[in-house]
Image (cartoon, rainbow, N blue to C red):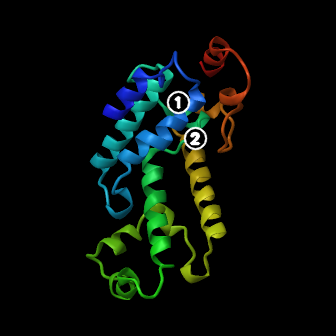
Amino acid sequence: MFTMNVLSSIGVNPSGFSKLLCSRFYAQIVRPQMEYGIAINCFNHTQLKSLEEAQDKCICKIYGASRKTSTKVMLHLAKLPTMRERVAILQAQFLFRSLSLPEDTLLYRLIPHIQYTRGHQWYKLSKTALWKLMPPTIADLDTRGFRAIKKKFLHSNLEKQIQGKNSKLLSSCRPTITLDPILWLPMTHEERSRCIR
């Protein structure tokens, strides 16, 4: 939160830069600090909830919302995934990249031994929601196929959120995962705030 407070003092706040620019500052500067080590660690429900709460505080600070406000719509407008989704994406990317390493790397040599060992971290990471959507023969999967599966995963999560309870506002938003035009169409600061509300 220290970085978010510093950025807030230079304009990453409701009355400073645009919401789109503030969201980009968050995604490029603040979120990577929260994501450090996420790709190689398994998280329990409490730890994931803490990550979600940290992200919610940052997003509320950008949009000027109270701490109890739901950030689902704000995240959707800015095309930002939830931290739970982000954890699944980073873990799947780590596993995908580890399978395409050069033959002279240590991890490449260890994968046949750790891939199916129950107690090993690699095995635990392979049980995440996104990785379970991957085809059984991962060797045939290329980067384009991985991105398509990731997009399908994010879209199915969006549909679940829209159908869930307390999602009346989210169901009024566009049902696609794209940057909402409200954030980039030319308009005054007051008009944009009115459109978002």
Between tags 1 and 2, which lies in front? 1
Q: CA distance from mark 1 to mark 2?
A: 29 Å
Q: Position of residue 121 (x, y in %)?
A: 30, 71
Q: Type of residue at label 2?
A: Gln
- Quarter in which the C terminus is drawn: top right
Q: Amino acid at mark 1?
A: Cys
Residue 1 visible in rendering: no
Q: Quadrant of the N terminus?
A: top left
The residue pinned by badge 1 equals 22
Between 137 and 21, the one nearer to me in the picture = 21
The kind of secondary structure element at disc 1 is: helix
- The circle drawn on residue 163 is 2
Identify the residue at image location x=47%, y=65%: 92
Examine the image and state in which quarter residue 163 appears.
top right
Vertical arrangement, residue 6 with respect to residue 92, above or below: above
In the rendered image, residue 103, in percent from the top left (x then y), is placed at 45, 88
Q: Residue at x 34, y 48 (%)?
A: 48
Q: Residues within 10 Å of mark 1 (few under 14, many from 20)?
A: many
Vertical placement of 63 versus 97: above or below? above
Q: Residue furthest top?
A: 190
The disc, 1 or 2, on the residue closer to the chain's N-terminal end is: 1
For image coordinates 55% across by 71% down, the residue present is 134
**Is 176 on the left or on the right of 58, as rendered?**
right
Residue sitting at x 53%, y 34%: 23
**In the image, 147: left or right of 5?**
right
